[in-house]
Amino acid sequence: MRFEIVILGCGAATPTLRHNPTSQAVNWDGRWFLVDAGEGVQLGIRRHRIPLQKIEGICISHLHGDHVLGLPGLLGSMNLFGRTASLNIYGPIGLEQFVKQALKSTETYVRFQLIFHANSKDACESIMQWRDCTLQSVPVKHRIPAYGYIFDYVPTIRNIKKEAIRTYMLQRSEILTLKAGKDVLRKDGKTIRVDDACMPSKSSLRYAYSGDTTPCDSFIQAARNADVLYHEATFMTALEKTARKTGHSTAFQAGHVAKEAKATHLVIGHLSSRYRDEEAVLEEAKTAFVNSSLAQEGMRIRLNPQTKRTETYLE
Ligand SMILES: [Zn+2]
């Protein structure tokens, strides 16, 4: 099982000499996804050796330019390099129209199939599933519709809680169903949920990505027990009012979200060029959540499901 996040861009608003706008690649059990595609995403992909044509899905958090303006060009390059495989693109309503219009206006041809999925505006939604992996979108609070994404790996073989056998009077066939990670639906219409009857999976992994947002409960709930939580930290506390007005978070708030969600490791990003001393931004996050790191282009975050250890490397 391979689970790796590669930061391609972690700056806010505009490209700077220090940071690219937001984008990251996720290698999830051998399958590649992009999360956001700000300007410069293609250079990040090249620089950090992400296999361009192996990218199967792109998750866009929202339609502000620093998260999406790299997408049309990226699709054009995939086409130029001969892509034939279809590509899933997840995001808010309006993303499809934006991409199609941008491609049309710039005469950028894409001969492979683009499959657009508009995320639910109201609730957390499972948008992709295969084997032991699930990808969810979660609505967050920004100035326009915006989403976080939750990558989960939960091995299906689960251990039954001893007391559950008695509590639910479980039959052998039901135990097998639950161990296989499936809920049991009984003839009386009652459902026995795997999470209620089984022990938490020891080697499960969760990566939670906030996108741009003020601190919000929906994200905290969805990100619960995340091994790695990536949260935006556009401002510091002195500008908390500005953060609220613009639909962003302070570094302290990002730390607080990680604490509330009982995450193991926090990485803060969407770093603003107004803060020359980024260590000060990190220190502020650490006052709420000690195990915090600053995102940086080229940072690779590897999660090991066996040891539950998170290792970060910088290229
Ligand atoms: Zn934004």
Image (cartoon, rainbow, N blue to C red):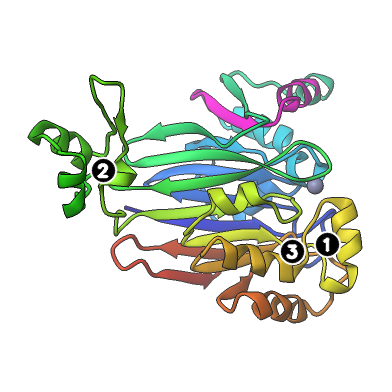
Q: Residue at x 61, y 23 (%)?
A: 116
Disc nearest the viewer among 1 and 2: 2
Give the vertical position of 280 relative to 114 (above or below): below
Q: Residue at x 56, y 50 (%)?
A: 221
Of pointers 1 and 3, the one earlier in the residue sequence: 1
Disc nearest the viewer among 1 and 3: 3
Task: Say the numbered circle drawn on residue 6.
Answer: none
Callout 2, which amino acid?
A: Thr
The residue where tag 2 is placed is 156
Is residue 179 covered in magenta?
no
Marks 1/2 in contact by CB < 8 Å: the verdict is no
Quarter of the image that includes the C terminus: bottom right
Q: How far is mark 3 from mark 2, CA to CA?
A: 35 Å
When asked about the image quadrant of residue 174, the answer is top left
Marks 3/2 in contact by CB < 8 Å: the verdict is no
The residue where tag 1 is placed is 16
Give the vertical position of 222 relative to 137 (above or below): below
- x and y, in percent, of residue 286 in the image: 65, 78
- x and y, in percent, of residue 245 in the image: 90, 53
Tell me the SS state at disc 3.
loop
Q: Which is nearer the eye, 40 or 183?
A: 183
When asked about the image quadrant of residue 297, the answer is bottom right
Of pointers 3 and 2, the one earlier in the residue sequence: 2
Number of numbered discs visible in the structure rendering: 3
Q: Magenta stretch?
A: 82-101
Tell me the SS state at disc 1.
loop
Callout 3, which amino acid?
A: Ala
Callout 1, which amino acid?
A: Thr
Say left or right for 147 vs 133.
right
Give the vertical position of 256 relative to 3 (above or below): below
Tell me the SS state at disc 2.
loop
The residue where tag 3 is placed is 233
